Image: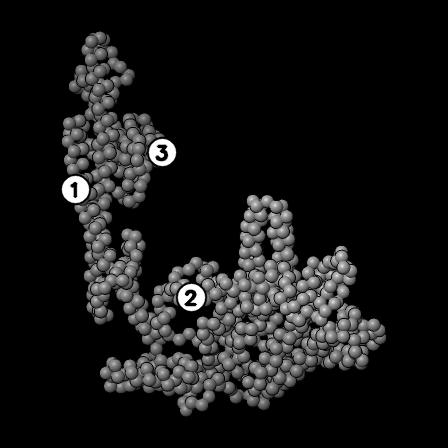
Amino acid sequence: MARKLRLFKEQMSKAGLLSSSTSATQVDLSFDDLEVKLGDLESELIEMNANGDKLQRSYNELVEYKLVLQKAGDFFHIAQRSAEALQREQASSQTGEQSLETPLLSDQEAVTDPSKQVKLGFTTGLVPREKSMAFERILFRVTRGNVFLRQAVVEEPVTDPASGEKVEKNVFAVFFSGERAKSKILKICEAFGANRYSVPEDLGKQAQMITEVSRRISELKTTIDAGLVHRGNLLQTIGEQYDRWNSLVRKEKSIYHTLNMLSIDVTKKCLVAEGWSPVFASKQIQDALQRATHDSNSEVGAIFRVLRTREMPPTYFRTNKFTSSFQDIIDAYGVAKYQEANPGVYTIVTFPFLFAVMFGDWGHGICLLLASLYFVLSEKKLSSQKLGDIMEMTFGGRYVIFMMSIFSIYTGLIYNEFFSVPFELFGKSAYGCRDPSCRDSTSAGLIKVRDTYPFGVDPAWHGTRSELPYLNSLKMKMSILIGVAQMNLGIILSFFNALFFRNGVNVWCQFVPQMIFLNALFGYLSVLIIVKWITGSKADLYHVMIYMFLSPTDELGENQLFAGQKLTQLVLLFSALVAVPWMLLPKPFLLKAQHERHQGQSYTALQGAEESLMVESSDDSGHHEEFEFSEIFVHQLIHTIEFVLGAVSNTASYLRLWALSLAHSELSSVFYEKVLLLAWGYNNVLILIVGIIVFIFATVGVLLVMETLSAFLHALRLHWVEFQNKFYEGDGYKFIPFTFSLVDVEDE
């Protein structure tokens, strides 16, 4: 039935008809009746197509035949006139000489002496124009020149009866002598795809044939048109019901496809279905099975039992239209292992926030907000439409873009940038000019005259000589603080994973040393940054961190930020050094001891059911018996090296927040100053209009499209690599329940 519907769809698309379910006369059919109806419609359509193809072929042949009769008739007509003229000339001159230019069909000698008359055969037809030169050359070579060929060009392309395609062709007439030459010529015509047609020699008969063929062409044209109308009406009728029929067939097909997965219990004569279902849905499934038993008037009900198995269950997170796009970002990296901590919850906040740190401009944020609001408010209309690939992707992430825009407005207000222009939104600037004339106020002479600007960056920094060093310092240190905080969150989540799975080894031999190592180095750096901000110290943090490793016992001097700093650094350095072997050595040995103690035991993923279905028990138990100490040790060594090096590289990786934020700010500033302000300065309306257009296109194309994509990808990398590798295994598989809602959108 699906094959028949595919045939209908193919025929409708060829006819340029669209399927529509707007018909008011939709009849409810049972599945068996639909099968009969589709069979009847298919037979009728195939018969119509066969008849139509046969008629069309005959029509195309007759059109070619008419062309051959007309063009070949011209050959005979010209030859006859030429022969008559020559005869008159010879009769008048009485020379009796044979002319070399006498046509073959009217050879003077043959006319005067019937005993010497040679009867020439001929064949006519059409040959594709691109093959005509080769056709002529081959004929000449095969017959060794004993052939006379005439060709005439057909101006309009002709529909070939065999292929049904438009082809440019030439009409040809080949005159030959002898049966051997004839058989060779016929084979050549066949090889070159030349269609041959018989033409009578008599000109009167030719005219009669042309009239007859024209009459038949006219009749065939009328018949073909009537057939096309009838076929169109049939396809129109199919199109009105097509969507309903297709949906019904696909649903039934998907049911049978699922039923094929069931196993047959021969002894009890029943079907056994093993599958996964969420715990909360058990009652709904039992109710549905009872309804099915009642509706089908079955004497025996379906039995629903919970089984115990060693197989890893699929992962299922209940999401809504807001959270699903954030969960998709996580699932693109890897589906969470069953009951593993889901980073998607934290991603709802951290992902748009990290994006906004790189995209901080509340003017651009408002533009993104308006775009996302359009998608959010039009979601009902747009979800039913067929969108392009890029639009489909953007629409799917509309709530992610919405959150990113909200956070961008927030960080833009902190950076105090509106298309790179600062505003005194939360009060007046804390700085004023030293002298009343305010000369060189952007480079010198600013003093603090009021309380600190209450929220975000003071607008007076914008355009000053020290703006870039100040913002670089601020954003770089802020990036490190954010990075260390998020990496700590990742390690803390690994603790909760270990706690949930009751894995004490991971708590003491992974979580604890990792926390010590990361915070002894970069946690300490974060504390130094905060202390420096609070105290206003001029200590060089680069110097402090470098010499903490190179010369830990040296005096700090002016780089000392608090009392006891030297001793603190020694303790932290020693802790970090101890944490490395702590991560590496104990875990493999503890796992080995654990394996020897619990040898032969196995663990089950689901508990609490009365009966147990031990799936692939022999394979699984064999798998649990294997314990390669060397493999475990090498794995732990790799994990330790990766974490130690990653602690440094991941912290440095968070500096992309600073780099992209700076790039966005500078690009925005360049477009504003070098395009908009420059155009404004010319005092010319035309230049100003061009400047505004260039500014809008640059802002939309570069800052709102390319920069958005860039910041999105960098935020994605920070989550996938720097955050999730601290705790997320992502080696599970998705729970995909059987549902009709997917049947209509999936391919066959």
Q: Quadrant of residue 584?
A: bottom right
Given the image, on which type of amino acid does mark 2 rest?
Glu
* Residue at 56 percent of width and 44 percent of height: 686
Q: Is residue 392 visible?
A: yes
Q: Position of residue 439 (x, y in %)?
A: 76, 56
Position of 133 relative to 618 (above/below):
above
Q: Secondary structure at mark 2?
A: helix
Mark 1 near mark 3, Cβ–Cβ under 8 Å? no
Circle 1 or circle 3, nearest the eye: 1
Residue beneath disc 2: 379
N-terminal of the pair, mark 2 or mark 3, is: 3
Q: Which residue is mark 1?
A: 219
Labels 1, 2: front one: 2
Please provide percent x and percent y for residue 297.
Answer: 23, 83
Whole-percent x and y of residue 408? Answer: 58, 66
Q: Which sits earlier in the primary sequence, circle 1 or circle 3?
A: 3
At 55% from the left and 75% from the top, the residue drawn is 346
Q: Gap in Å between the C-alphas at discs 1 and 3?
A: 37 Å
Q: Residues within 10 Å of mark 3 (few under 14, many from 20)?
A: few
Few, some or many residues within 10 Å of mark 2 (<14, 14–19, 20+) = some
Sequence order check, earlier mark of 1 and 2: 1
Quadrant the C terminus occupies? bottom left
Q: Which residue is mark 3?
A: 134
The residue nearer to you, when weighing 687 against 187, is 687
Front residue of 33/114: it is 33
Give neighbour class at mark 1: few <14, some 14-19, many 20+ (Cα, 10 Å): few
